[in-house]
């Protein structure tokens, strides 16, 4: 390969083919790996990649590989144009190792990597054609809302699943904490659902109950349902708190989920307890 060719490839730009629409709009609380929490979400394809013809045959696969971009890495940091390019981190501190031990970035799945690209295998629940456009309904994603999608490929079990593979410092799924819901938080959750139900019924009547891309995405991003409480508990059970703060008792943390902010804290019994649920 010539130097000129190598130079041109070092700055390759991949097209964005769609966006992930999901209940989680912030990094805090998002699963650190795919398939730890069976959250349902949707990939909204954009033109010209939203044509149904591009997905013929994909319905025969149960899972897909999704290539995506860590788009929140530098959102609230130094906003220099070259920030992402100038901040290569040779080593990172994986939460799985307590946030103290350093390892090489290429020995990790850290978001702070040169390409800022993520790779996840997720379950393909359905392919929906709404208003002539493609929506991929998926579950188990570790991506937040608005994540740019770079590519989609079918998951092929005979070559992609390697049961004898060694997983280094992450040989098994992380330990889950017990999560309880305070009475006042449960009552708040139910009340929010009741209020949204009244509003949604009025919206259905006004729009003649016709499904649109907007309505499907709204359900994923904002509409709170009773099963969401189990999703919220499953997310908190992963313990999204920074490793250096996981021994703090009665310190409140807030995870944003769909249209609510969920407050939780470690209590004396060793459980994480959801203490408050407020509408955003």
Image (tube, rainbow, N blue to C red):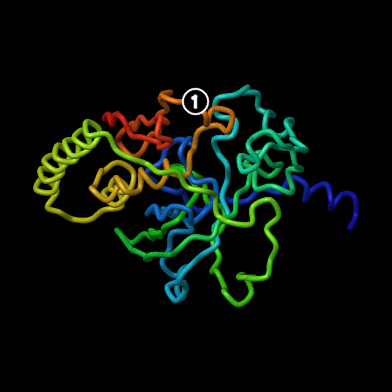
Residue at coordinates 41% horizontally, 67% vertically from top-left?
52
Q: Which quadrant would the N terminus be assigned to in this image?
A: bottom right
Q: Which residue is mark 1?
A: 248
- Residue reaching furthest right? 2
Using the image, determine if residue 89 lies above or below residue 127: above
Q: Is residue 80 above or below residue 34?
A: above
**In front here: 148 or 121?**
121
- Which residue is pictured at 55% across the width and 54% down the height? 173
Q: Position of residue 130 (x, y in %)?
A: 30, 60
- The residue that appears at 26% across and 53% down in the rendered structure is 212
Residue drawn where x is 15% and y is 44% of the image: 200
Instruction: Tell me if 149 is positioned left or right of 221 in this view.
Output: right
Check disc 1: other Cα within 10 Å, few if <14, some if 14-19, many if 20+.
few
* Residue 102 screen position, x and y as percent: 74, 37
Q: Quadrant of the C terminus?
A: top left
The quarter of the displayed image where residue 98 is located: top right
The residue sitting at the front extreme is 269
From the viewer's side, name the closer residue of 140 and 130: 140
Along the line of sight, which residue is nearer the eye, 213 or 264? 264
Which element is circle 1 on?
Answer: loop
Rendering coords of residue 117 (x, y %): 63, 47
Q: Indicate the position of residue 258 as horizontal and vertical percent values.
A: 33, 39
């Amino acid at each position: 390969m010539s130097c000129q060719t190598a130079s041109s490839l070092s700055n390759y730009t991949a097209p964005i083919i769609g966006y992930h629409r999901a209940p989680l709009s912030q990094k805090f609380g998002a699963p650190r790996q795919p398939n730890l929490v069976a959250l349902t979400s949707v990939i909204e394809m954009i033109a010209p990649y939203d044509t149904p013809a591009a997905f013929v045959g994909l319905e025969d696969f149960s899972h897909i590989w999704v290539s995506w971009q860590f788009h929140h890495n530098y959102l609230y940091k130094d906003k220099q144009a070259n920030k992402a390019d100038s901040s290569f981190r040779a080593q990172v501190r994986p939460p799985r190792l307590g946030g103290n031990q350093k390892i090489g970035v290429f020995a990790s799945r850290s978001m702070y990597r040169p390409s800022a690209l993520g790779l996840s295998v997720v379950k393909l629940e359905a392919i929906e054609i709404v208003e002539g456009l493609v929506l991929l309904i998926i579950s188990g994603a570790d991506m937040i809302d608005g994540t740019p999608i770079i590519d989609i490929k079918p998951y092929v079990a005979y070559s992609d699943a390697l049961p004898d593979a060694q997983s280094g410092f992450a040989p098994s799924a992380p330990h889950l904490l017990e999560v309880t819901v305070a009475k006042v938080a449960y009552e708040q959750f139910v009340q929010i659902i009741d209020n949204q139900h009244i509003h949604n019924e009025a919206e259905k009547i006004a729009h003649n109950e016709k499904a649109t891309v907007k309505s499907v995405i709204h359900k994923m991003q904002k509409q709170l349902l009773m099963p969401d409480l189990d999703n919220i508990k499953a997310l908190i059970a992963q313990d999204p708190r920074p490793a250096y703060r996981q021994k703090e008792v009665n310190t409140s943390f807030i995870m944003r989920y769909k249209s609510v902010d969920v407050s939780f804290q470690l209590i004396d019994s060793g459980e994480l307890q959801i203490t408050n649920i407020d509408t955003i």
